[in-house]
């Protein structure tokens, strides 16, 4: 039987160990989530190809640059065919962070066929309202070799990638969806998953890849995350069926604005493209 002293020691050590794990271990313990991504009409040349989604890097004072470099190295080693980045590249505190942004993005992983990015709310600076900050983030991404879509589309090997701008920054334009051939192979990128509840999706059918939530960062076992930056609390993480043949995937993100994660590891999603 354990002594009273041993029980007291265990009672003291357990929360300390849990706190250290939540602070020092899980926030930088990346999980590669491997999933199939079926797309209607996918060109034969893309079947079996790899698309990697990264989100919410939050380059700045809180996320360790060395951790991001390790993440980028792991993704580059996968030699993905496509890389998509769904916003929040920075946590903006002032122009002194631009050199850090450029330096970290020097190691950005690239897809063999293309690298596409969209912006998130933090990329618009304070109160999500600084357009000049967003323009500077776009400049850094351009230099790093990413194609930034701001309510624009691009076609990669026959796949139309739709990039919507940020919801909280009031820059999103769902009218872009009217230009998309609903019968052709396509994929939508957006940052904030709440945007799927807006009117304007029309007859869009297919996958929507999002980020923004960080999965809540802390998730009690068997319970929903207590804190989520979305109105629709269904949109925490992972795949969500929206009905009308629309499917949402919410990436838990790589970085954080507060260094704490529990039962909600950072994520890089490795999709295997398949004909849907």
Image: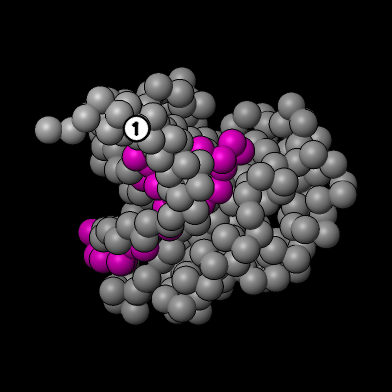
**Of residues 65 and 272, which is closer to you in this image?**
65
Across and down, in percent, residue 99 comes to: 83, 59
Quick check: 224 above or below 153?
above
Q: Looking at the rendering, which quadrant does residue 271 occupy?
A: bottom left
Q: Residue at x 43, y 44 (%)?
A: 21
Q: Residue at x 59, y 32 (%)?
A: 167
Residue 250 left/right relative to 57:
left
Residue 271 within the magenta-colored segment of the rendering: yes
- Where are the magenta residues, as a range? 249-276
Quick check: 172 above or below 232?
below
Residue beneath label 1, please?
A: 9
Residue 264 left/right relative to 77:
left
Residue lying farthest to the right in this orientation: 95
Q: Residue at x 26, y 37 (%)?
A: 241
- Badge 1 crowding class, 10 Å Cα cut-off, few under 14, some 14 to 19, many 20 or more, is few
Quick check: 114 above or below 26?
below
Across and down, in percent, residue 118 comes to: 60, 51
Residue 24 left/right relative to 17:
right
Residue 27 left/right relative to 145:
left
């Amino acid at each position: 039987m354990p002594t009273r002293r041993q029980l007291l020691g265990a009672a003291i050590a357990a929360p300390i160990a849990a706190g250290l794990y939540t602070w020092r271990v899980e926030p930088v313990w990346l999980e590669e989530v491997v999933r199939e991504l079926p797309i209607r009409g996918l060109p034969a040349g893309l079947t079996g190809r790899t698309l990697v989604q990264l989100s919410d890097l939050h380059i700045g004072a809180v996320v360790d640059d060395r951790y991001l470099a390790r993440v980028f190295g792991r993704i580059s080693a996968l030699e993905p065919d496509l890389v998509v980045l769904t916003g929040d590249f920075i946590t903006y505190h002032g122009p002194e962070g631009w050199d850090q942004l450029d330096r970290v993005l020097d190691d950005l992983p690239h897809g063999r066929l293309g690298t596409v990015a969209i912006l998130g709310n933090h990329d618009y600076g304070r109160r999500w309202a600084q357009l000049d900050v967003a323009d500077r983030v776009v400049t850094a991404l351009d230099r790093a070799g990413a194609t930034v879509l701001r309510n624009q589309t691009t076609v990669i090997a026959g796949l139309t990638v739709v990039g919507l701008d940020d919801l909280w920054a009031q820059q999103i334009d769902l009218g872009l969806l009217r230009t998309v051939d609903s019968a052709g192979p396509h994929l939508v990128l957006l940052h904030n998953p709440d945007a799927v509840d807006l009117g304007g999706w029309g007859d869009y059918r297919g996958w929507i890849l999002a980020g923004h939530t960080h999965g809540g960062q802390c998730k009690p076992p068997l319970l929903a995350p207590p804190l989520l930056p979305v109105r629709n609390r269904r949109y925490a993480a992972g795949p969500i069926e929206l009905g009308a043949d629309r499917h949402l995937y919410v990436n838990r993100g790589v970085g954080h604005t507060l260094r704490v994660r529990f039962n909600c590891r950072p994520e890089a999603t490795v999709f295997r493209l398949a004909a849907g």
